[in-house]
Image (cartoon, rainbow, N blue to C red):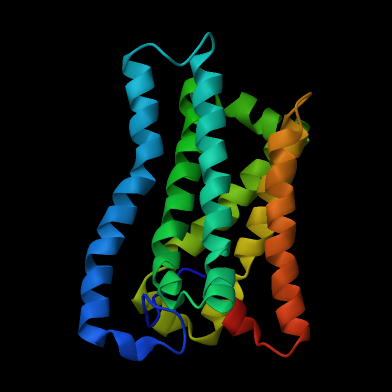
Amino acid sequence: MWQHGFSRLIPKGHDELLPQSYLFLILRYLKPVIFLICLLPLVLLLWDGFHDALGANPIETITHRTGDWTLRFLLLTLAMTPARRLLGWTWASRLRRMLGLFVFFYASLHFLTYLVLDQFFDWSEIIKDIAKRPYITIGFSAFVLLIPLAVTSTQAMMRRLGRRWGQLHRLAYLVAILGVVHYLWLVKADYLQPTIYASVLAILLGMRVWWWRGGASMAALK
C-alpha cells in the first residue's frame, strides 16, 4: 500500500508533454511540501495547547483530533489508487508510503494520549478498558495491525518479503474498517462524522471490489 512507484504529474497518454527529468524535479519539491502540510494538524494542536484553546476537556480534544486525523490520512492513503486509475494521476502512487506512515504517526499520538494523558500508565486499568469496552478493543486492535505495516514500509522490507509484502499490506483495509467501527461505537449522539468516514471507506473499498471483479489484480489495487 505504501510503496514507491513510477510517477508522473500529467494524465495518462500525455506523458510526452514533459521530460521525465522535469517530472521528477517537480516531485522532488512536491513531496516535502505535502510532508509539511501533513504536519499541520500537529502544529495546530500544539498551538491550541500553548494558547489554552483545547476546551474544557483538553485530553478529550487531543484524543478526538488525533483520532480524526488518523482516519483522514488512512482514507487519503486508500484514495491514491482510485486517483491513479480514474484521473490518471500516476504520481499519486509515489505518495502512498509517506501518507501511510502519517497514518501510523497520528495513530501513535492517539494511542499515547490515551496511554499517558488519560490513563497515566495505569496498566491494570488499561487492560480492563481493552477487555470491557468494545470500541477500545477495536481501536487497540487496529493500532496493533498498523505496526507491521509501518515496520515493513521500507524498500528493503519490500524486497525481503516479496509477494508476501503485498499480502501483508492488505491489512490496511481491515485497519480502516476497524477504525471506522471504533469511531461509530465511540460516539453517543452525533453520528454524522463517523458516518461520512464510513461512506467514504465503503466507496473506496467498493471501487476495488469492482475493479477486481473486472479482472484487475489485487497487486494493482493496493
- Of 49 and 31, nearer the camera is 31
- Of 25 and 188, nearer the camera is 25
Q: Quadrant of the C terminus?
A: bottom right
Q: In the displayed structure, would residue 181 be above or below residue 153?
A: above
Q: Is residue 62 left or right of residue 202?
A: left
Q: In the displayed structure, would residue 58 be above or below residue 68?
A: above
Q: Is residue 114 visible?
A: no
Q: Is residue 46 visible?
A: yes
Q: Residue at x 74, y 58 (%)?
A: 202
What is the residue that sits farthest to the top in this orientation?
56
Q: In the displayed structure, would residue 6 be above or below residue 115?
A: below
- Of 114 and 170, nearer the camera is 170
**Residue 175 lies in quadrant:** bottom right
Q: Is residue 102 left or right of residue 26?
A: right
**Residue 124 lies in quadrant:** top right
Q: Residue at x 79, y 23 (%)?
A: 189
Residue 145 percent across, percent down from the top left: 59, 56
Q: In the displayed structure, would residue 65 be above or below residue 168?
A: above
Residue 113 percent across, percent down from the top left: 48, 29
**Residue 64 lies in quadrant:** top right
Q: Is residue 132 left or right of residue 172?
A: right
Q: Residue at x 37, y 71 (%)?
A: 154
Q: Residue at x 51, y 41 (%)?
A: 69
